[in-house]
Image: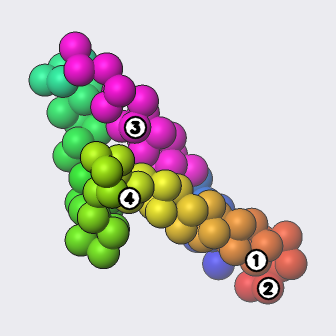
Amino acid sequence: MQSVLIFIYYFLTVYQLLLFGYVLLSWFPNFRGNPIHRFLIVMVEPYISKFRRIIPPIAGMDFSPIIGFLLLRFAITGIVNLINAGAF
C-alpha cells in the first residue's frame, strides 16, 4: 500500500507542475497554439474547468487554477502524512 501512496504522491506532484506550466504559458499569448501549450490544455483543462463552473472569472481574472493548486497541495500533504505515519 505504501508504494501506491508514493505513486499517487509523484503523480500529483507532476500534475501540479503541469498546472504551473499551464498558468505560466497562459501569460504569453505568443505560445498559444504551441504543441506544448496544446498538450498542457489537454492535460489540465478538464481539472480546471470543474472549478471554473463553480467560481466564474471575476473582473477578467480566472481564479480556478488557484483553487486547483490549493486542492492539489491539500491532497499531497495528506498523502505525505499517511506515508510518514506508516498508516498502511
- Amino acid type, callout 2: Ala
Q: Secondary structure at mark 2?
A: loop
The circle on residue 87 is 2
Residue that mark 3 sits on: 23
* The furthest residue to the left: 33
Taking the magenta stretch, the answer to whether it contains residue 39 is no
**Residue beneath the point at 22% across and 14% down:** 30
- Proximity of marks 2 and 1: CB atoms separated by less than 8 Å: yes
Q: Earlier in the sequence, mark 3 or mark 1?
A: 3
Badge 4 vs badge 3, beta-carbon distance below 8 Å:
no
Residue 1 relative to residue 43: left or right: right
Q: Quadrant of residue 47?
A: bottom left
Amino acid type at circle 4 is Ser
Q: Quadrant of residue 78?
A: bottom right
Quick check: marks 2 and 4 in contact, CB under 8 Å? no
User: Spatial distance from mark 1 to mark 4, Cα to Cα?
Assistant: 27 Å
Q: Which mark is residue 2?
A: none
Does the magenta run of residues contain 16?
yes
Pick whichever of labels 2 and 1 is earlier in the sequence. Answer: 1
- Magenta-colored span: 12-30
Q: Nearer the viewer, residue 2 or 36?
A: 36
The secondary structure type at the circle numbered 1 is helix
